[in-house]
Amino acid sequence: MTARNGLRMSTAKAFLKPIRTRKNLNIVTGALAFRIFFEGTRAEGVAYSQVGRQCYASARREVLVCGGAVNSPQLLQLSGIGPAALLREHGIDVVADLPGVGENLQDHYVIGCAYRCTRPVTVNEQSRGLALMREAVKWAVSRRGLLAMSAAHIGAFVKTRPELDSPDVQYHILPASMTQNIAPGKMELDSFPGMTCAPCQLRPQSRGSIHIKSSIPTTPPAIRPNYLTARLDQETVVQSLKIARRLFNAAPLDPWRGAELEPGADVQSDDELLAFARERGNTIYHPVGTCKMGSDPMAVTDAQLRVHGVQNLRVIDASVMPNLVSGNTNAPVIMIAEKAADMIKAAARAA
Ligand SMILES: Cc1cc2nc3c(=O)[nH]c(=O)nc-3n(C[C@H](O)[C@H](O)[C@H](O)COP(=O)(O)OP(=O)(O)OC[C@H]3O[C@@H](n4cnc5c(N)ncnc54)[C@H](O)[C@@H]3O)c2cc1C
């Protein structure tokens, strides 16, 4: 990194240096916000640590929390906003008893249906050894090839039941497979050609939670996703795997399709498919809903994203979505942020 005076700074120093490109903007990086401070119920500022140093930033107007669906509820709970019993259990003074903070966790849970491919045309074998070097050269020369591709080449939104108004499952179809059971959450491409069709239910009914395990900010919270606890989610996941099989067994794929790798020929009944989904499914990292917007007793923010029961505090991130969107979450979060910026500016102008 080069400082504005042209001097080269060490990476660590650059990392910690406040970024000041405008008089009214001060960005502090490598910092962990660990508590919002209140005067009564009015948010006054934020305490954060930076390499062991404890610092404080005061807020003349508002504190905006944007820590994401896991960390925003954690920070609120650490600061005394959340279910009173949980806060007291950890010796935290209650500023606002909001039972919905950390509840209503929703996520997209994905399960792969994978087949061997009879020809060497998949990412698996092209991302190794000489083939990978060839792809690297192709990228350097033409910006094309394997390194210019997205992970999923085909997407589809499908109804698992014809009577539904809109699709309830999204399919990600990849010219790649990761069927080795290495360790939970750890994936590696297979060494032979393979292909995968991975469905995820778009609007699951299962609900999880984020609860602090301690008043120490560096202790990760307990994340309980509770995937596939709702009956509808169990039925949908089973149907979605059956549809994935149907897709891969379509006649045009006959010359390309090898043996089914997952769920595998011995997994046939609904109960077996569900058990497979429980064992081999994974998050696609779309957690939302843990500081949901609304006006019911479990709502955390109002429609202006202001936290109920306190003043000068907003939450602006995926946690405010009352329900999971029917697709990927990044663009909706950007939309939430843009809308929040407009609301904050409008409120400032009106003040
Ligand atoms: C591996 C992965 C792949 C994904 N792929 C896609 C995709 O292909 N398409 C798509 O649409 N979505 C994708 N998503 C989801 C998308 O990235 C998220 O929905 C989106 O980024 C959520 O935005 P957010 O602002 O709520 O939270 P985040 O983007 O998580 O932002 C929260 C920020 O707050 C910081 N933070 C948290 N706590 C503290 C604290 N106490 N102090 C200081 N800083 C803190 C974090 O470091 C982070 O920078 C993916 C997510 C992951 C993890």
Image (cartoon, rainbow, N blue to C red):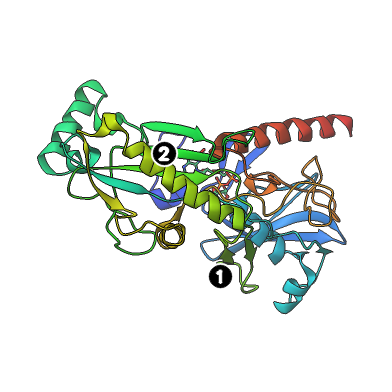
Q: Measured from the top left, where is residue 34 in percent x and y? A: 64, 62
Q: Nearer the viewer, residue 2 or 311?
A: 311
Residue located beneath label 1 in the image: 219
Q: Measured from the top left, where is residue 168 in percent x and y? A: 57, 40
Residue at left offset 57%, top offset 53%: 233
Q: Amino acid at mark 1?
A: Thr
Circle number at residue 172 = 2
Label 2's element?
Answer: strand
Residue at left offset 50%, top offset 34%: 157
Label 1's element?
Answer: loop
Does residue 229 appear left or right of residue 77 in this picture? left
Q: Measured from the top left, where is residue 274 in percent x and y? A: 46, 59
Query: Residue 332 occupies which quadrant of the picture?
Result: top right
Query: Residue 5 occupies which quadrant of the picture?
Result: top left
Q: Residues within 10 Å of mark 1 (few under 14, many from 20)?
A: few
Q: Nearer the viewer, residue 49 or 110?
A: 110
| Residue 8 visible to the viewer | no
Residue at left offset 30%, top offset 55%: 264
Q: Residues within 10 Å of mark 2 (few under 14, many from 20)?
A: many
Look at the image and tell me in which quarter the N terminus lies.
Answer: top left
Q: Amino acid at mark 2?
A: His
